[in-house]
Amino acid sequence: MLSLRNLVKVYPGPVSALRGVDLEIPRGMFGLLGPNGAGKSTLMKILSGLLEPTSGEVTLDGLDIVRHPEALRPHLGYLPQEFGFYPYLTGEAMLLYLLKLKGVTAPRGLKSLCAELLERVNLTFAAKRKVKEYSGGMRQRLGIAQALAGNPQLIIVDEPTAGLDPEERLRFYRLLAEVANERTVLLSTHIVEDVAMLCPRFAVIRQGRVVAITSPSEAKTSIQGTIFEGTASATELAELQRTRRVTQAVLFEGRNRVRIHSTGGDVPAGFERVTPTLEDAYLLMMKDTREASATSQQPPVVEAAREVAR
Ligand SMILES: Nc1ncnc2c1ncn2[C@@H]1O[C@H](COP(=O)(O)OP(=O)(O)OP(=O)(O)O)[C@@H](O)[C@H]1O
């Protein structure tokens, strides 16, 4: 179990990136979902021992990570947002180099471990190819291979699917799901689909605060019967955005398909009740906490947004 207690990070400026984060993260896959700038990378860096928090406590199975970051190393695999690969090395040479850097030991030798890891992430066929020839998905799989070295109990992945095409993304999801069978995997993302596909539970983070802790099905059930969809012209859409709680507006076959949230059942003509998606639930959580912080001197609190998830 990874436990975070009242975690605060203030950068010089001052910028409050984390404003008191409390989380209990069990084994398996756990998502951390939030918009850009919410504080996800800051949290990931603290959890991986790369950044010191201003205050607060982090423990992994009782081990104090903040006080003893060196004790965490053998238990941690980290795939950062920007991974510095050397493009002219082969995948195999790059991985070998990373394993040496990490100080990984292997009873049958590092070369043999390298081969096992490449096999595990389905890259054996590309072991001798230069990394510059790898696709985005192949690079991410190589990143997971180095994170898996040493069989860590905690793997942290920061925005891993950004820039992957749909097929690569699906393949990467499968790999992450497999990896999470045996350990804790913390997945930070701003992509709702990542969470919908992978995470039995997730936390929503906004402006350095956890605003909800829920599961995809709980979040969708909480708004069952309250989402309506219809078509609108550009003027009608502008009016809806002013007067209604619009969760999504997308162009479909050249027309605006608009989804709105309504609890009273009073909806514009032509709008029909639809099954809620996780995207609807997430966008409502974001709206609610924004509205709460706009009307209050106090920052939005966890309980306020949890109402949405109920
Ligand atoms: N080194 C730094 N110095 C000052 N402010 C910083 C620093 N790093 C991040 N911030 C600020 O802290 C806040 C949280 O940033 P962080 O990168 O953790 O968010 P994020 O959710 O990971 O977003 P993104 O996906 O865009 O990286 C932002 O306002 C950001 O501008």
Image (cartoon, rainbow, N blue to C red):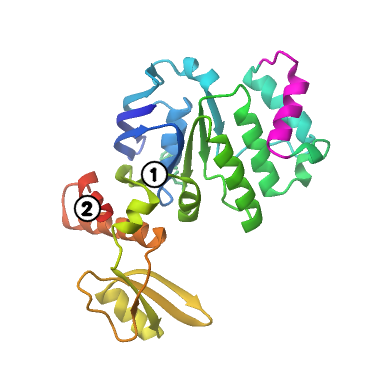
Q: CA distance from mark 2 to mark 1?
A: 16 Å
Question: Which residue is labeled 1 in the image?
Answer: 202
Q: Residue type at mark 2: give it.
A: Glu
* Ligand 1, image quadrant it occupies: top left
* Residue at the image point whose x is 72% and y is 23% from the top: 113
Tell me which secondary structure the magenta stretch mostly adopts: helix
SS class of the residue under badge 1? strand
- Tell me which segment is drawn in magenta: 105-122
Q: Residue type at mark 1: give it.
A: Phe
134 relative to 220 in the view: left or right: right
- Rendered-image quadrant of the N terminus: top left
Q: Residues within 10 Å of mark 1 (few under 14, many from 20)?
A: many
- Work out whether mark 2 precedes mark 1 in sequence or the reverse, and give the earlier one: 1
Residue 272 vertical position relative to residue 297 in the rendered view, above or below: below
Residue 12 drawn in magenta: no
* Residue at the image point whose x is 16% and y is 53% from the top: 296
Residue 113 vertical position relative to residue 162 in the rendered view, above or below: above
Q: In the rendering, at what x and y percent does residue 25 appear?
A: 38, 33
For this rendering, which residue is in front, 304 or 216?
216
Question: Can residue 84 be seen in the rendering of this structure?
Answer: no
* Residue at the image point whose x is 43% and y is 29% from the top: 46
Residue that sits furthest to the top in the current view: 107
For this rendering, which residue is in front, 193 or 47?
193
Question: Can residue 279 be seen in the rendering of this structure?
Answer: yes
Q: In the rendering, at what x and y percent does residue 248 appear?
A: 39, 69
SS class of the residue under badge 2? helix
276 relative to 151 in the view: left or right: left
Question: Which residue is labeled 2 in the image?
Answer: 307
